[in-house]
């Protein structure tokens, strides 16, 4: 079974989780939880995902969610949009899961804009890639469950593309 994981966080650098969701290959929600980061959520992060300190006050700790996720994904393939960012919140996930794959890397040649400066494609935002794949939002963008479902749509679209030989 393939699982699609997404998190929402307190920011980009030195961040902590404030929400985590996992959906399976059929789109069924396996996990959808707020996470208490143990520190205040910066207003600029709240402006993006809408999650406040009051929302996470009684949520499970990041350590509890990490442990639960590692047990949940054991032996399963995990697909994450921008995996290199999200895996930092789950030390050991690459050993626990059968495989961790980055959906963004697969989507980049299809939806990224070419950069002459970098000599490569720019990484496309999840929303743009999902929209190009015909995804219909199921919840608020920049919420973990909605983004995990969007990742699933992109991944399924990528699997249907012919392989260049």
Image (cartoon, helix red, strand yellow):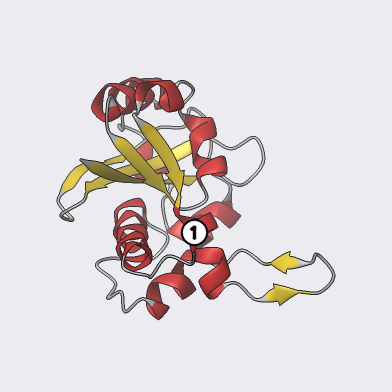
- Residue at 31% x, 60% y is 146
Q: Secondary structure at mark 1?
A: helix
**The quadrant where residue 153 appears:** bottom left
Question: Residue at image x 36%, y 39%?
Answer: 56
Report the front residue among 100 and 33: 100
Residue shown at 42% from the left, 37% from the top? 100
Would residue 84 be found to the left or right of residue 157 on screen? right
Count the numbered circles shown: 1
Which is more toward the observer, 148 or 164? Answer: 164
Which residue is nearer to you in this view: 62 or 120? 120
Instruction: Point out residue 123 in the picture as x, y percentages from the top left corner.
Output: 61, 63
Q: Quadrant of the N terminus?
A: top left
Quarter where residue 101 is shown = top left
**64, 154: nearer the viewer:** 154
Q: Compared to 51, does 33 lie above or below?
A: above
- Classify residue 4 as left or right of residue 164: left
Left or right: where does residue 88 sit relative to residue 147?
right
Q: Give the residue displayed 35% in from the left and 28% down from the top.
A: 97
Relative height, residue 4 to residue 75 (above, below): below
Residue found at the far right of this picture: 117
Q: Is residue 80 left or right of residue 138?
A: right
Label 1 neighbour load within 10 Å: few <14, some 14-19, many 20+: some
Mark 1 lies on residue: 106
């Amino acid at each position: 079974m393939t699982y699609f994981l997404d998190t929402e966080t307190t920011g980009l650098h030195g961040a902590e989780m404030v929400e985590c969701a996992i959906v399976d290959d059929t789109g069924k929600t396996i996990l959808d939880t707020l996470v208490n980061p143990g520190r205040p959520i910066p207003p600029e992060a709240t402006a993006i995902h809408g999650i406040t300190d009051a929302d996470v006050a009684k949520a499970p700790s990041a350590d509890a969610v990490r442990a639960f996720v590692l047990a949940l994904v054991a032996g399963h393939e995990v697909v994450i949009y921008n995996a290199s960012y999200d895996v930092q919140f789950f030390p050991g996930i690459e050993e626990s899961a059968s495989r961790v794959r980055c959906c963004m890397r697969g989507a980049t040649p299809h939806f990224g804009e070419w950069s002459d400066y970098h000599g490569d494609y720019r990484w496309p935002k999840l929303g743009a890639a999902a929209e190009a794949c015909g995804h219909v939002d199921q919840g608020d963008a920049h919420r973990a469950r909605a983004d995990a479902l969007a990742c699933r749509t992109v991944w399924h679209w990528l699997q249907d593309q012919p392989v260049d030989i």
